[in-house]
């Protein structure tokens, strides 16, 4: 299962809380009776309706968590390449949303678009007085 959260939602709830809520929701949706459910690093508490185990350093200790991390990154990169077609001024196909020098230059030249998290503490945002 893959899920996504919008920049506005992340800005209103915070990245960490949004990530934990999304993980709890997805874990509950894919859990099957008798399976051991794992989360990468954090107990989800009431965010998750199923029993689970937090695995600190999960990418290095669990093949399932490592695979989920790869799927998440590949999915994000694909999304950003698709977004590049709609928002060509930010070179999302080349930087896939990472704060590269070219991406910071694009923000300085064009401002931010709806995909940019205003809660992200970027030097480029500060320079443009677009801070959180």
Image (cartoon, rainbow, N blue to C red):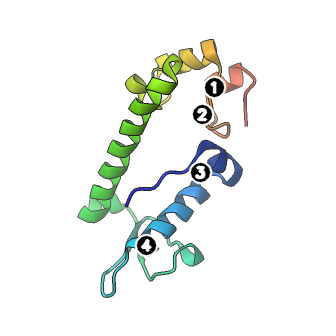
Q: Which residue is mark 3?
A: 15
Work out whether residue 17 or residue 59 is closer to the camera in this orientation and state it. 17
Q: Nearer the viewer, mark 4 or mark 1?
A: 4
Q: Nearer the viewer, mark 2 or mark 4?
A: 4
Q: Quadrant of the C terminus?
A: top right
Residue depicted at x 44% and y 83%? 51
Q: Is residue 111 left or right of residue 104?
A: right
Rounded to the nearest angstrom, the CA distance separating label 4 from label 1 is: 34 Å
Q: Quadrant of residue 128?
A: top right
- Pointer 2: residues within 10 angstroms few (<14), some, or many (20+)? some
Q: Which residue is mark 2?
A: 116
- Pointer 1: residues within 10 angstroms few (<14), some, or many (20+)? some
Q: Nearer the viewer, mark 1 or mark 3?
A: 1
Q: Nearer the viewer, mark 2 or mark 3?
A: 2
Residue depicted at x 48% and y 64%? 23
Residue 42 is at least partly visible in this image: no
Rounded to the nearest angstrom, the CA distance separating label 2 from label 3 is: 13 Å
Q: Which residue is mark 1?
A: 112
Return the x and y of residue 75 as percentages of the image width and height. Answer: 36, 45
Among numbered discs 1 and 3, the one appearing first in the sequence: 3
Q: Quadrant of residue 46?
A: bottom right
């Amino acid at each position: 299962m893959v899920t996504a959260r919008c920049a506005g939602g992340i800005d209103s709830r915070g990245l960490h809380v949004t990530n934990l809520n999304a993980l709890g929701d997805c874990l509950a949706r894919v859990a099957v009776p008798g399976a051991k459910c794992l989360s990468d690093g954090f107990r989800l508490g009431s965010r998750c309706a199923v029993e689970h185990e937090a695995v600190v350093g999960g990418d290095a200790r669990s093949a399932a968590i490592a695979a989920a991390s790869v799927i998440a990154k590949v999915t994000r990169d694909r999304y950003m390449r698709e977004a590049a077609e709609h928002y060509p001024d930010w070179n999302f196909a080349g930087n896939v949303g990472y704060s590269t020098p070219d991406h910071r230059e694009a923000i300085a030249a064009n401002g931010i678009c709806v995909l940019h998290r205003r809660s992200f503490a970027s030097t480029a945002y500060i320079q443009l007085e677009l801070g959180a």
